[in-house]
Amino acid sequence: MSRHPIPLFWRLFVPNATVLGVACAVLIVEPANGRVAALVGGLTMMLAVNLLLMRRAVTPLTRLTALMRRVDPLHPGERIPLLGPSSEVTVLVEAFNEMLDRLEAERRDSGLRALSEREGERRRLADELHDQIGQTLTAIALQVGRLLDRTPPELHDETIAVRQTILATIDDVRTLARQLRPEALDALGLAPALTNLVERLAEQTGMRFARNLDRQLPPLGADAELVVYRVAQEAMTNAIRHAGATTIWISLHSTGGAVTLEIADDGRGITECSGDGSGLRTMRERALTIGAELAIGARGDRGTSVRLAVKAEEP
């Protein structure tokens, strides 16, 4: 783009002045002399040419206004093409596109920081649940077990019930700790962690799962692996809670230097699903933090499909 674009004022003034000058010249050379048809025809031509030139000059502004109204932070990347000669309008369009670049970059950075802080807090809570509350409850359960031999017969059943309640609470604490921070992801990697998640959900819900998880994947960063895991967790939870699905398909594979997660179900579909949009919005926000591509839509005639593509790290 040139350093001195043609100002919008002159782009509007010069064509209008040219059209008026040509019209005056025609009337001087061949006066209308009462010929109304000639005057009307000349006026119509002037208006048509003026309309064409004005529309050409302000079209970028119209496009800019339309884009500003439909910009969605959850669907980044849309920009206005720089068409036409350099002018104040094209400079404005270029500045707006650059502003979107900066805003989207800052949103990704702030989202990644928030993700790291949130997961750090989850890790801390999971450790406290496991190491402090879990161990304390285990010690109490052992103490109650030792008291069984000295408990009066009339209190024996109640003591056993208390012990069983404590053991059940220990299991709940461990489950909550796993939900807060997947231990398998840190210890074993992405594919084994997803396998563990699917097996746990199948056991808890009785849902039928079909999985195809490739363990030979290109390397992903820790944040990217966590986002893939959380998106899979959210997508399967939505299918179980809201879609009325009976079968969930989950696939993890690599294509073209990217790791792709695909989850589909045979439920009611995204348009009829009773869950609100918060889960879908959370998945989109997570994908944005690592620059991943997320597509959510209908699966044929029935069900929902979620596809997440994450670029692998450079070797």
Image (tube, helix red, strand yellow):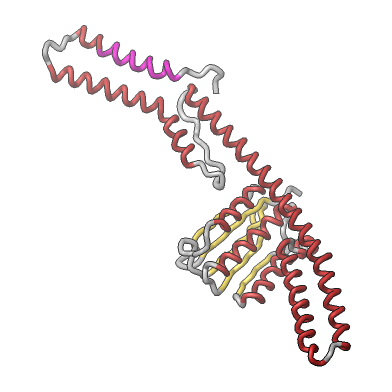
In the picture, measured across the screen, residue 116 lies left or right of residue 277, that is right
In the picture, measured across the screen, residue 13 lies left or right of residue 30, that is right
Residue 57: x and y in percent read: 40, 25
Name the residue furthest bottom. Answer: 153
In the picture, measured across the screen, residue 61 lies left or right of residue 152, that is left
Residue at image x 56%, y 73%? 247
Residue 315: x and y in percent read: 76, 49
Residue at image x 72%, y 61%? 180
* Above or below, 39 relative to 183: above
For the N terminus, the quadrant is top right
Span shown in magenta: 8-23
| Number of numbered discs visible in the structure rendering | 0
Q: Nearer the viewer, residue 135 or 1?
A: 135
Q: Nearer the viewer, residue 113 or 6?
A: 113
* Above or below, 147 relative to 20: below
Name the residue furthest left. Answer: 34
Q: Main secondary structure of the magenta part?
A: helix
* Above or below, 70 relative to 53: below
Q: Nearer the viewer, residue 266 or 109?
A: 109
Name the residue furthest top. Answer: 28
Residue at image x 68%, y 60%? 229
Residue 298: x and y in percent read: 49, 61
Question: Does residue 13 show up magenta in the picture?
Answer: yes
When asked about the image quadrant of residue 95, the answer is top right
Question: Does residue 165 show up magenta in the picture?
Answer: no
Residue 149: x and y in percent read: 88, 88
